[in-house]
Amino acid sequence: MSTSPDDPLSPVALAGRHVRLEPLSRDHHDGLVEAVRDGEPWRLWYTSVPPPEGMGQEIERRLGLQAAGSMLPFTVFDAPTGRIAGMTTYMNIDRAGPRVEIGSTWYAGRVQRTGLNTEAKRLLLAHAFDTLDCLAVELRTHVLNRESRRAIERIGAKLDGVLRCHGRAKDGSLRDTCVYSIVASEWPAVRANLEWMLAQPR
Protein backbone atom coordinates (compact mmCIF):
# COMPACT_ATOMS: atom_id res chain seq x y z
CA MET A 1 0.00 0.00 0.00
CA SER A 2 1.28 3.43 -0.84
CA THR A 3 2.11 5.71 2.07
CA SER A 4 1.92 8.86 -0.03
CA PRO A 5 0.05 11.70 1.69
CA ASP A 6 -1.94 11.98 -1.53
CA ASP A 7 -3.28 8.43 -1.07
CA PRO A 8 -6.46 8.53 1.06
CA LEU A 9 -5.85 4.92 2.14
CA SER A 10 -2.48 5.74 3.67
CA PRO A 11 -2.15 5.19 7.45
CA VAL A 12 -3.99 7.90 9.36
CA ALA A 13 -4.66 8.78 13.00
CA LEU A 14 -8.26 9.40 14.08
CA ALA A 15 -9.16 10.92 17.44
CA GLY A 16 -12.24 11.62 19.54
CA ARG A 17 -13.14 12.24 23.17
CA HIS A 18 -13.15 8.57 24.22
CA VAL A 19 -10.75 6.96 21.77
CA ARG A 20 -7.69 7.54 19.65
CA LEU A 21 -6.88 5.32 16.68
CA GLU A 22 -3.25 5.28 15.60
CA PRO A 23 -1.58 3.35 12.77
CA LEU A 24 -0.45 -0.02 14.10
CA SER A 25 3.25 -0.10 15.00
CA ARG A 26 5.62 -2.76 16.29
CA ASP A 27 6.28 -0.34 19.14
CA HIS A 28 2.73 -1.04 20.39
CA HIS A 29 3.49 -4.70 21.13
CA ASP A 30 3.88 -4.53 24.90
CA GLY A 31 0.81 -2.33 25.35
CA LEU A 32 -1.26 -4.68 23.20
CA VAL A 33 -0.10 -7.67 25.24
CA GLU A 34 -1.14 -5.88 28.42
CA ALA A 35 -4.52 -5.00 26.89
CA VAL A 36 -5.31 -8.52 25.66
CA ARG A 37 -4.56 -9.97 29.10
CA ASP A 38 -7.39 -7.79 30.47
CA GLY A 39 -10.43 -10.00 29.97
CA GLU A 40 -8.55 -12.66 27.99
CA PRO A 41 -10.77 -12.32 24.88
CA TRP A 42 -8.68 -14.88 22.98
CA ARG A 43 -10.29 -17.61 25.10
CA LEU A 44 -13.67 -17.11 23.40
CA TRP A 45 -13.86 -19.98 20.93
CA TYR A 46 -15.67 -18.00 18.21
CA THR A 47 -13.16 -15.13 18.10
CA SER A 48 -9.77 -14.78 16.39
CA VAL A 49 -8.13 -12.59 19.04
CA PRO A 50 -4.38 -13.18 19.40
CA PRO A 51 -3.12 -14.55 22.73
CA PRO A 52 -0.29 -12.66 24.46
CA GLU A 53 2.39 -14.97 23.07
CA GLY A 54 1.02 -14.55 19.54
CA MET A 55 0.81 -10.74 19.53
CA GLY A 56 4.08 -10.21 17.67
CA GLN A 57 3.00 -12.59 14.92
CA GLU A 58 -0.39 -10.87 14.68
CA ILE A 59 1.22 -7.45 14.38
CA GLU A 60 3.42 -8.75 11.56
CA ARG A 61 0.41 -10.35 9.85
CA ARG A 62 -1.54 -7.11 9.88
CA LEU A 63 1.41 -5.01 8.75
CA GLY A 64 2.03 -7.49 5.94
CA LEU A 65 -1.56 -7.11 4.76
CA GLN A 66 -1.15 -3.35 4.97
CA ALA A 67 1.92 -3.58 2.73
CA ALA A 68 -0.12 -5.69 0.28
CA GLY A 69 -2.85 -3.04 0.18
CA SER A 70 -5.68 -5.12 1.67
CA MET A 71 -5.69 -3.85 5.27
CA LEU A 72 -5.25 -0.62 7.20
CA PRO A 73 -4.65 -1.63 10.84
CA PHE A 74 -5.05 0.59 13.91
CA THR A 75 -4.04 0.39 17.53
CA VAL A 76 -6.90 1.56 19.77
CA PHE A 77 -6.03 3.88 22.65
CA ASP A 78 -8.28 4.83 25.56
CA ALA A 79 -8.08 8.60 25.09
CA PRO A 80 -8.57 9.72 28.73
CA THR A 81 -5.79 7.45 30.05
CA GLY A 82 -3.55 7.14 27.00
CA ARG A 83 -3.38 3.36 27.50
CA ILE A 84 -3.60 0.91 24.63
CA ALA A 85 -7.01 -0.77 24.65
CA GLY A 86 -7.12 -3.00 21.57
CA MET A 87 -6.92 -3.30 17.80
CA THR A 88 -9.19 -2.66 14.82
CA THR A 89 -8.79 -2.44 11.03
CA TYR A 90 -10.11 -1.52 7.67
CA MET A 91 -9.81 -4.85 5.87
CA ASN A 92 -10.77 -6.52 2.58
CA ILE A 93 -10.15 -3.14 0.96
CA ASP A 94 -11.70 -2.75 -2.48
CA ARG A 95 -10.23 0.37 -4.04
CA ALA A 96 -12.42 0.13 -7.13
CA GLY A 97 -15.62 0.77 -5.18
CA PRO A 98 -14.24 1.92 -2.96
CA ARG A 99 -15.54 -0.15 -0.06
CA VAL A 100 -13.99 -1.51 3.12
CA GLU A 101 -14.81 -3.84 5.97
CA ILE A 102 -14.33 -2.79 9.59
CA GLY A 103 -13.15 -5.86 11.44
CA SER A 104 -10.49 -7.86 13.29
CA THR A 105 -11.47 -5.78 16.32
CA TRP A 106 -10.89 -6.63 19.97
CA TYR A 107 -10.80 -4.61 23.18
CA ALA A 108 -9.47 -4.93 26.72
CA GLY A 109 -12.12 -5.83 29.26
CA ARG A 110 -11.83 -2.48 31.04
CA VAL A 111 -13.17 -0.51 28.05
CA GLN A 112 -15.98 -2.82 27.01
CA ARG A 113 -19.49 -1.41 27.40
CA THR A 114 -18.08 2.13 27.43
CA GLY A 115 -18.31 4.85 24.79
CA LEU A 116 -14.97 3.78 23.31
CA ASN A 117 -16.28 1.26 20.78
CA THR A 118 -19.18 3.49 19.72
CA GLU A 119 -16.85 6.40 19.07
CA ALA A 120 -14.29 4.19 17.33
CA LYS A 121 -16.97 3.02 14.91
CA ARG A 122 -18.13 6.61 14.34
CA LEU A 123 -14.57 7.71 13.54
CA LEU A 124 -13.95 4.78 11.20
CA LEU A 125 -17.30 5.17 9.43
CA ALA A 126 -16.86 8.94 9.08
CA HIS A 127 -13.42 8.49 7.53
CA ALA A 128 -14.71 5.76 5.21
CA PHE A 129 -17.70 7.72 3.94
CA ASP A 130 -16.57 11.35 4.22
CA THR A 131 -12.90 11.02 3.24
CA LEU A 132 -12.57 7.75 1.32
CA ASP A 133 -15.99 8.21 -0.37
CA CYS A 134 -16.89 4.55 0.15
CA LEU A 135 -20.01 3.11 -1.43
CA ALA A 136 -20.51 0.81 1.56
CA VAL A 137 -18.82 -0.38 4.72
CA GLU A 138 -19.13 -4.02 5.82
CA LEU A 139 -19.00 -5.53 9.29
CA ARG A 140 -18.81 -9.31 9.75
CA THR A 141 -19.08 -11.62 12.73
CA HIS A 142 -19.62 -15.25 13.69
CA VAL A 143 -23.30 -16.18 13.54
CA LEU A 144 -23.13 -17.30 17.19
CA ASN A 145 -21.39 -14.16 18.44
CA ARG A 146 -24.65 -12.64 19.62
CA GLU A 147 -23.03 -9.82 21.56
CA SER A 148 -21.16 -8.66 18.47
CA ARG A 149 -24.28 -8.98 16.32
CA ARG A 150 -26.31 -6.86 18.74
CA ALA A 151 -23.59 -4.20 18.79
CA ILE A 152 -23.43 -4.10 14.98
CA GLU A 153 -27.21 -3.88 14.68
CA ARG A 154 -27.39 -1.20 17.37
CA ILE A 155 -25.27 1.20 15.31
CA GLY A 156 -27.62 0.80 12.34
CA ALA A 157 -25.97 -1.76 10.06
CA LYS A 158 -28.28 -4.08 8.12
CA LEU A 159 -27.85 -7.81 7.66
CA ASP A 160 -27.00 -8.64 4.04
CA GLY A 161 -26.97 -12.37 4.66
CA VAL A 162 -25.15 -15.33 6.18
CA LEU A 163 -22.18 -16.96 4.47
CA ARG A 164 -22.64 -20.60 5.45
CA CYS A 165 -19.54 -22.73 6.07
CA HIS A 166 -17.54 -19.59 5.36
CA GLY A 167 -14.50 -20.90 7.21
CA ARG A 168 -13.34 -22.64 10.34
CA ALA A 169 -13.17 -21.31 13.87
CA LYS A 170 -9.89 -21.78 15.72
CA ASP A 171 -11.25 -24.94 17.37
CA GLY A 172 -11.84 -26.45 13.91
CA SER A 173 -15.63 -26.05 13.90
CA LEU A 174 -17.31 -24.69 10.79
CA ARG A 175 -18.07 -20.98 10.91
CA ASP A 176 -21.15 -19.30 9.49
CA THR A 177 -20.46 -15.58 9.00
CA CYS A 178 -23.07 -12.83 9.28
CA VAL A 179 -22.38 -10.04 6.79
CA TYR A 180 -23.73 -6.59 7.67
CA SER A 181 -23.31 -3.33 5.82
CA ILE A 182 -24.00 0.37 5.89
CA VAL A 183 -24.34 2.04 2.49
CA ALA A 184 -23.49 5.65 1.75
CA SER A 185 -27.11 6.82 1.62
CA GLU A 186 -27.65 5.46 5.15
CA TRP A 187 -24.61 7.16 6.64
CA PRO A 188 -26.31 10.46 7.71
CA ALA A 189 -28.91 8.58 9.77
CA VAL A 190 -26.32 6.18 11.18
CA ARG A 191 -24.08 9.12 12.12
CA ALA A 192 -26.95 10.86 13.91
CA ASN A 193 -27.71 7.66 15.81
CA LEU A 194 -24.08 7.21 16.86
CA GLU A 195 -23.84 10.82 18.01
CA TRP A 196 -27.06 10.38 20.02
CA MET A 197 -25.64 7.21 21.62
CA LEU A 198 -22.42 9.03 22.54
CA ALA A 199 -24.39 11.85 24.15
CA GLN A 200 -26.22 9.54 26.55
CA PRO A 201 -25.05 9.54 30.18
CA ARG A 202 -23.07 6.48 31.23
Image: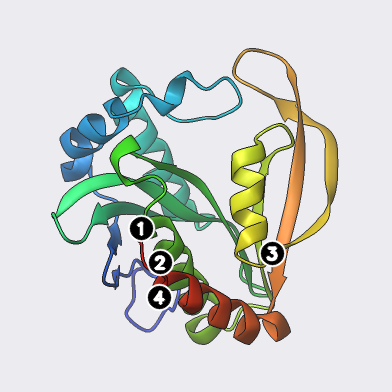
Q: Quadrant of the C terminus?
A: bottom left
Q: Going from the N terminus, do you reach mark 3 or mark 1 first? A: 1
**Real-space CA distance between mark 2 and mark 4, rounded to the nearest whole angstrom:** 11 Å
Question: Which residue position holds label 1?
Answer: 116
Looking at the image, residue 189 sits to the left or right of residue 2; the answer is right
Percent coordinates x, y for residue 159 in the rendering: 79, 57
Q: Secondary structure at mark 4?
A: helix
Q: Going from the N terminus, do you reach mark 2 or mark 4 first? A: 2
Is disc 3 in contact with disc 1, using a CB cutoff of under 8 Å? no
Q: Residues within 10 Å of mark 2 (few under 14, many from 20)?
A: many
Is disc 2 in contact with disc 4, using a CB cutoff of under 8 Å? no
Residue at coordinates 66% horizontally, 67% vertically from top-left? 156
**Real-space CA distance between mark 1 and mark 4, rounded to the nearest whole angstrom:** 12 Å
Instruction: In this rendered view, identify the residue nearer to me: 54 or 31.
Output: 31
Amino acid bearing label 1: Leu
Is disc 1 in contact with disc 2, using a CB cutoff of under 8 Å? yes
Question: Which residue position holds label 4?
Answer: 199
Question: Which residue position holds label 2?
Answer: 119
Q: Secondary structure at mark 1?
A: helix
Amino acid bearing label 4: Ala
Q: Residues within 10 Å of mark 3 (few under 14, many from 20)?
A: many
Is disc 1 in contact with disc 4, using a CB cutoff of under 8 Å? no
Q: Residues within 10 Å of mark 4 (few under 14, many from 20)?
A: few
**Real-space CA distance between mark 3 and mark 2, rounded to the nearest whole angstrom:** 15 Å
- In this view, the residue farthest toward the front is 201
**Real-space CA distance between mark 3 and mark 1, rounded to the nearest whole angstrom:** 18 Å
Percent coordinates x, y for residue 140 in the rendering: 66, 48
Q: Is residue 1 visible?
A: no
